Amino acid sequence: MFTDSHCHLNRLDLSRHDGKLSGAIAAMKAANVSRAMAIMCDFAEFDDIRAIVNEFSDDALNLGMSVGIHPCEDLAVLKSATVERLVKTASDNKVWAIGETGLDYYWSTENKAEQQASLARHIYASQALKKPLIVHTREAKDDTLDILKAENAEHGIIHCFTEDWETAKRALDLGFYISFSGIVSFKSAQTIRDAAMKVPRDRILIETDSPYLAPVPKRGKPNEPAFVPFVASCLADMFDMRAEEVGSLTARNFENLLAQYA
Ligand SMILES: [Zn+2]
C-alpha cells in the first residue's frame, strides 16, 4: 500500500479519465494507493478540496487535506493567511497538516518579506494545532531553514525535496521529514539521490505533487496520485528494496508524523 503525501487533487488533468475525478480515484485504488493528502494553496480552494475528500474517502482510500497559502500566491492572498484564519480553517478533522507554505525566490522575489512573514504565521498555526507543517522551498534554502529554526518549527515535511544532503541534514536535525517526488527519478537528479541515500529510512516520505512533475516512466505526462508507486520504485532501486516495501515504510512514516503529538 502506498501513501501520496502531497497531491493537488482539485487540479488534476483528467483527460485520461474522461474528465472524471472518479476515474483518477479508481486508478489510485488499482495502484494500491490507500491514502493521500490533498494540498491547498489558497483559501479559495478549501471548499472544493474538502468536498473531494468527503466524496471519495472510503474503506479503501483514506483522504485528508492541508490548509495553507502557497508562497507564490499574490500579495493579497499571502496576507489573507492570518494565524486566526489558518487555525480556524484547519481545525476541521479532515485537515491533517498546515501548508503548503514556504519560500520561493525562483518564481517570486518581490514579495520576500511577505513570504517570510506568511511562513512564520503558518508555523504558529501548526504549533497551535499540533498539525505538521508542509514546507515548499526553492532557491531559498538558507532563509527557509533559518526561519524554521528561529520559530522552533520541529514538526513537518520538506516537500518535493530538491536540495543537497547538507540541507536535508539541517531539516532532519530540526525534526522534519523529507518527501521525495518524481524529480528523484530524473536523470539529472543525482544530487537529490545522493541525499536520499543518507536520509534515515524512518524519516522519508513519497509524493507525486500531481498534476506536476510526473515520475519516470510517465515523465512529461500529466501526473496523478496513481503514479506514486513509481516514486517508490525509484527509491527501491537505490535502497535495494522492493517498491512495496518502500510503500509500507513511507506509509508508516506518514502515520508517525501525523501521530507525533496526537
Ligand atoms: Zn504542491
Image (cartoon, helix red, strand yellow):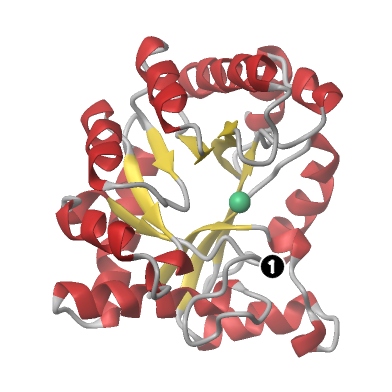
Please determine whether, in this image, residue 183 is positioned above or below residue 141: below
Residue tagged by mark 1?
56
CB of mark 1 near ligand 1 (< 8 Å): no
Splitting the image into 4 quarters, where does residue 83 fall? top right
Please determine whether, in this image, residue 251 is positioned above or below residue 112: below
Report x, y in % for residue 7: 60, 59
Report x, y in % for residue 112: 64, 21
Pick the front one: 58 or 254: 254
Label 1 Cα crowd, 10 Å radius (few <14 / some 14-19 / many 20+): some
Tag count in the figure?
1
Splitting the image into 4 quarters, where does residue 21 fall? bottom right
- Residue at 48% x, 75% y is 33
Q: Secondary structure at mark 1?
A: helix
- Residue at 63% x, 80% y is 220
Q: Quadrant of the C terminus?
A: top left
Pick the front one: 191 or 8: 191
Please determine whether, in this image, residue 26 is positioned above or below residue 120: below
Q: Quadrant of the N terminus?
A: bottom left
- Residue at 82% x, 31% y is 74
Report x, y in % for residue 236: 24, 77
- Residue at 63% x, 49% y is 39
Pick the front one: 85 or 62: 85
Q: Amino acid at mark 1?
A: Phe
Report x, y in % for residue 193: 28, 63
Left or right, 244 with reference to 198: right
Splitting the image into 4 quarters, where does residue 14 fall? bottom right
Left or right, 198 with reference to 14: left
